[in-house]
């Protein structure tokens, strides 16, 4: 908070005095220029003990006593304007913006030379989102005192915050060397440079920031966020790392910010540690829990991810984002009932979220609730008729419902929209097999495996078609490869047993049939996922 009258407070505003942070050494000339913004009132307007006492009390935070002294000063025509200016500043500190603005306007009307009152008025307008009014107040202050560093900084900050980066730099140019020596100044310059896509000019500012011995933590967090938003994550970490190395306990805000930056850098262990630190400082941080769950999932620890999400759901049971993540992880762990229940609640809360609806449809497929899945997917396709993934998913569901002609149409549409949709070819081949169009099914699976030999499910599928076509010599090596790729493939063992029986190798056929039975039992016990799910990247 600026006051037009209190030099010590203006110093603190620029230094961040009283804020936790690293020390920054500003040139003495910077303070001299900063203090020159103090209105002519201290030199050419009358003052008295009430004004001085009000300044002192306000600087110490005793606003009630400061107001009393300011009102006494207002009774004297010679110091009325100063008293009004102080009273306006007090009201702004008390978050009584309308009253503060009224007092400041009256002060300016009484004495137009009050530069500080205009700056306070600009601050009030800026916080209220009245950009044009704030700009006018700052410009008027600068016209009255062109050498005011504070007025230039305030106007430059306003222009930068509204995206007028070139204008901000023009305002800041006369004091740019001084701005480079202060955190607030560096923030303005960095915002302008990055807004104008001049990333190279930011490196010296980061280096200068690292030279400061003390910076208020909120300013460092703002600078780090600005850098991270512009893909300068390593630089953002360099801004915050001194707080890590200081050995003092981290604040919640700092721990949370460090966690996010380490995620960006791919250092998941460090990120997890900082999120846990943040969570200890704020046990109701749902976003911390969600982030910890995301990290655990990336580390293939879905059980741990689920544990974090259970806590998050306990804290925020109606949060659609938490419900969705909980439901999705439940599906990954084959906890289908819990997963679908949570996803249904998430969709009920956010029916406009297509991703939520799609994953719920996938959950319905996993539970064999195909008509429900079909309804959801058809609804999504009405909104996005050219989405190849949705056509693939609907084709899959129609296939599972034995609606082979509509399935074929939907899968062909998916391929038309995206020729690289592997799943669509796979289910198109299965559909052709169900329709007993074995030559077409053979061509589809053969071409698919030529393009994507890593697609394991297509081997037993092709082998099955070849057995149906009595092409045993071609089918046997395909089925044997399918078993090498997936020794627990019930379909591959079963079809190989059929093939061996038909070519007279009864003993070998019996062994394969027994293996098929064992694989089927393992499927039931272990709950192996079928190739019929519709999750896609």
Image (spheres, helix red, strand yellow):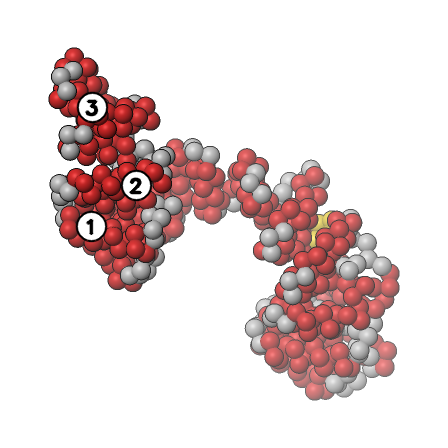
Residue at the spot of label 3: 496
| Nearer-N-terminus badge (2/3) | 2
Residue 250 seen in render: yes
The answer to whether residue 324 is above or below residue 506 is: below
Q: Nearer the viewer, residue 465 or 526?
A: 465
| Nearer-N-terminus badge (3/1) | 1
Where in the figure is residue 118, as x and y percent of width and height? Answer: 70, 78
- Indicate the secondary structure of the residue bearing disc 2: helix
The answer to whether residue 404 is above or below residue 531 is: below
Residue at the spot of label 2: 447
- Marks 3 and 1, Cα distance to the nearest angstrom? 28 Å
Depth-wise, is mark 2 or mark 1 nearer the camera?
Answer: 2
Residue for point 35% across, 35% down = 453
Where in the figure is residue 150, as x and y percent of width and height? Answer: 75, 70
Residue for point 20% across, 43% down = 440
Where in the figure is residue 93, as x and y percent of width and height? Answer: 64, 67
**Label 2 neighbourhood size at 10 Å, few (<14), some (14-19), many (20+)?**
few
Residue at the spot of label 1: 408
Q: Is residue 238 left or right of residue 399?
A: right
- Marks 2 and 1, Cα distance to the nearest angstrom? 17 Å
């Amino acid at each position: 908070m600026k006051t037009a009258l209190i030099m010590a407070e203006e110093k603190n505003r620029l230094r961040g005095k009283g804020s936790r942070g690293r020390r920054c050494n500003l040139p003495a000339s910077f303070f001299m220029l900063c203090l020159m913004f103090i209105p002519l009132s201290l030199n050419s307007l009358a003052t008295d003990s009430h004004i001085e006492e009000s300044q002192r009390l306000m600087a110490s935070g005793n606003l009630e006593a400061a107001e009393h002294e300011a009102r006494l000063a207002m009774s004297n025509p010679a110091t009325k304007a100063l008293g009004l200016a102080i009273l306006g500043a007090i009201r702004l500190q008390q978050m009584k913006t309308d009253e503060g603005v009224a007092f400041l306007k009256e002060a300016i009307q009484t004495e137009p030379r009050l530069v500080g009152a205009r700056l306070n008025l600009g601050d009030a307008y800026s916080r209220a989102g009245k950009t044009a009014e704030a700009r006018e107040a700052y410009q008027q202050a600068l016209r009255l005192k062109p050498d005011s560093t504070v007025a230039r900084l305030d106007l430059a900050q306003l222009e930068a915050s509204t995206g007028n980066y070139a204008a901000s730099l023009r305002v800041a140019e006369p004091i740019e060397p001084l701005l480079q020596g202060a955190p607030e100044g560096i923030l303005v310059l960095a915002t302008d440079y990055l807004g104008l896509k001049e990333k190279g000019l930011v490196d010296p500012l980061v280096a200068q920031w690292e030279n400061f011995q003390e910076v208020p933590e909120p300013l460092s967090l703002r600078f780090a966020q600005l850098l991270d938003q512009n893909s300068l994550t390593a630089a953002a970490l360099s801004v915050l790392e001194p707080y890590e190395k200081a050995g003092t306990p981290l604040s919640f805000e700092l721990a949370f910010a460090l966690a996010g930056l380490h995620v960006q850098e791919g250092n998941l262990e460090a990120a997890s540690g900082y999120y846990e630190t943040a969570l200890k400082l704020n046990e109701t941080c749902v976003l911390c829990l969600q982030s910890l769950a995301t990290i655990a999932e990336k580390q293939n620890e879905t059980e741990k991810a689920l544990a974090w999400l259970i806590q998050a759901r306990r804290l925020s049971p109606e949060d659609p984002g938490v419900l969705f993540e909980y439901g999705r992880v439940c599906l990954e762990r084959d906890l289908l009932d819990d997963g679908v229940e949570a996803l249904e609640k998430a969709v009920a809360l956010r029916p406009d979220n297509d991703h939520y609806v799609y994953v719920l449809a996938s959950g319905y497929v996993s539970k064999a609730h195909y008509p429900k899945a079909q309804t959801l997917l058809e609804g999504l396709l009405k909104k996005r008729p050219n989405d190849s993934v949705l056509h693939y998913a609907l084709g899959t569901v129609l296939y599972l419902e034995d609606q082979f002609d509509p399935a074929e149409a939907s899968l062909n549409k998916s391929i038309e929209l995206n020729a690289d949709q592997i799943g669509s070819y796979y289910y198109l081949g299965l559909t052709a097999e169900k329709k007993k169009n074995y030559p077409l099914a053979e061509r589809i699976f053969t071409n698919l495996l030529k393009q994507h030999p890593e697609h394991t499910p297509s081997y037993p599928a092709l082998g099955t078609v070849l057995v149906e076509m009595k092409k045993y010599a071609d089918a046997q090596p395909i089925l044997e490869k399918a078993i090498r790729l997936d020794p627990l493939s019930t379909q591959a063992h079963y079809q190989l047993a059929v093939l061996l029986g038909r070519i007279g190798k009864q003993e070998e056929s019996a062994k394969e049939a027994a293996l098929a039975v064992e694989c089927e039992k393992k499927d039931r016990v272990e709950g192996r996922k079928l190739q019929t799910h519709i999750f896609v990247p």
